[in-house]
Image: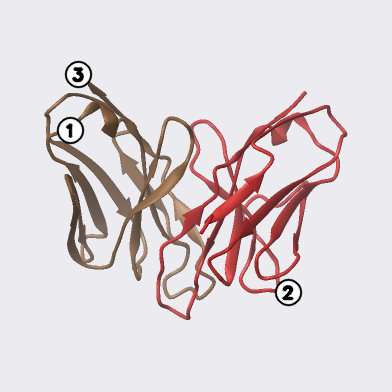
Chain colours: A brown, B red
Amino acid sequence: KNEVEQSPQNLTAQEGEFITINCSYSVGISALHWLQQHPGGGIVSLFMLSSGKKKHGRLIATINIQEKHSSLHITASHPRDSAVYICAVPEYYGGSQGNLIFGKGTKLSVKP
Amino acid sequence: NAGVTQTPKFQVLKTGQSMTLQCAQDMNHNSMYWYRQDPGMGLRLIYYSASEGTTDKGEVPNGYNVSRLNKREFSLRLESAAPSQTSVYFCASRVVQGRIDNEQFFGPGTRLTVL
């Protein structure tokens, strides 16, 4: 069964800073998910990636399958990026039910 | 497209009361999920339904029951609420096709307090 660890748990940054959030998992996966939870509570999917890198605006997600590690980067951070960022991976490698397990999240606060 | 909807948004119960959380999706997804989110812990799976007509226990099923009413709707029932069930509950759905992974969509959440 997969296990997922995120770091750091909390992160405070000044507006404009480059931010990195890390995620490690224990068992091989088909794809890794990055999610964002807004202060109001809603959860949205940011990325799903199985190799290499994906970019959406100022957000970049990378994954190293051999090292079982993924990073989420935010360039030119802004106070509106303040949220909890969650990493999720399949519970079992090759699992067909699609169950995900979730990291505990990284709470990001970007100060103006 | 409304996506995933949940009702109610907030609920306060007394210990021993029962209630049903409703969830519906309009994206024709086959799999649906109920999670709970507690401070300092990641989202934990309560029950899931891989397809219409099937339900299975997740990591923390005790004290809950579910019904997959049809492809669109998946409800979560607390028969006798306990303070330990105070949490935020999220419903989610996605398409599961063998080993192909797909994005998961979440409802807005239900904040439940049991006194």
| Residue A107 shows in this picture | no
Q: Is residue A34 above or below residue A1?
A: above
Q: Residue at x 16, y 25 (%)?
A: A15
**2 and 1 marks in contact (CB < 8 Å):** no
Q: Amino acid at mark 3?
A: Pro
Answer with left or right where residue B13 lies relative to residue A103. right
**Quadrant location, the C terminus of chain B:** top right
10 Å crowding of disc 3: few (<14), some (14-19), many (20+): few
Q: Position of residue B98 (x, y in %)?
A: 47, 81
Q: Which residue is mark 2?
A: B53
Q: Position of residue A59 (x, y in %)?
A: 20, 47
The residue nearer to you, when weighing A25 against B78, is B78
Q: Position of residue B23 (x, y in %)?
A: 66, 53
Q: In the image, which disc is placed on residue A77?
A: 1
Q: Residue at x 50, y 38 (%)?
A: B41
Circle 2 — which element? loop
10 Å crowding of disc 1: few (<14), some (14-19), many (20+): many
Nearer-N-terminus badge (3/1) = 1
Q: In the image, which disc is placed on residue A112?
A: 3
Determine which quarter of the picture holds residue B82: top right
Q: Residue at x 57, y 63 (%)?
A: B26
Host chain of mark 1: A
Q: Residue lying at the far front in this picture: please name it.
A: B1
Q: Amino acid at mark 1?
A: Ser
Q: Position of residue B60 (x, y in %)?
A: 65, 49
| Residue A68 shows in this picture | yes
State the CA–CA distance, disc 2 to disc 1.
45 Å
Answer with left or right where residue B55 lies relative to residue A40. right
The residue nearer to you, when weighing A85 against A104, is A85
10 Å crowding of disc 2: few (<14), some (14-19), many (20+): few
